[in-house]
Amino acid sequence: MKNLLNYQFLIPLVLLLGFAPFVPQPHILEKLRMLLSGTLTKPIDIFDLFWHSWPFVLLGYRVSLGKDYKV
């Protein structure tokens, strides 16, 4: 678990999985726009939002642990 919370692992994960695909727009932005507009209703879209957002959640958790966390 400690290797998963390493910044050297998390930052590339967020950049690659969190923002993929990059063109024409990242899926995470598309799904967040759908969520805010109320059109996020299909199960595949909800799963896609979850799949592209969990790296951000994990990075946020690691940041909240602070610098005292030993990896």
Image (tube, helix red, strand yellow):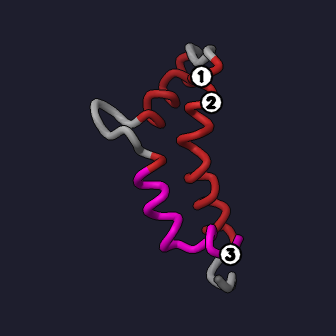
Q: Residue at x 62, y 82 (%)?
A: 67
Q: Residue furthest left?
A: 24
The CA distance from mark 2 to mark 1 is 5 Å
Q: Which residue is mark 2?
A: 47
Residue at 53% of width from left, 41% of height from top? Answer: 52
Mark 1 lies on a secondary structure that is helix
Q: Amino acid at mark 2?
A: Phe
Q: CA distance from mark 3 to mark 1?
A: 31 Å
Q: Tag 1 or tag 3, which sits nearer the N-term?
A: 3
Mark 2 crowdedness (10 Å alpha carbons): few <14, some 14-19, many ≥20: few
Q: Position of residue 2 (x, y in %)?
A: 68, 75
Mark 2 vs mark 3: which is more N-terminal?
3
Report if residue 6 lies within the magenta region.
Answer: yes
Residue 71 lies, with reference to residue 40, above or below; the image says below
Kindly indicate whether the residue at mark 1 contacts the one at mark 2 (C-beta within 8 angstroms): yes
> Residue, x 62% and y 26% (percent of image)?
46
Q: Is residue 50 above or below residue 36?
A: below
Q: CA distance from mark 2 to mark 3?
A: 26 Å
Magenta residue check for 3: yes
User: In the image, is residue 62 above or below residue 51?
Assistant: below
Residue drawn 62% across and 37% down?
50
Residue 66 found in image quarter = bottom right
Residue 2 numbered tag? 3
What segment is highlighted magenta in the picture? Answer: 1-16
The picture quadrant where one finds residue 69 is bottom right
User: Which amino acid is tagged 1?
Assistant: Ile
The spot of residue 39 in percent (x, y) is 56, 14
> Secondary structure beneath disc 2?
helix
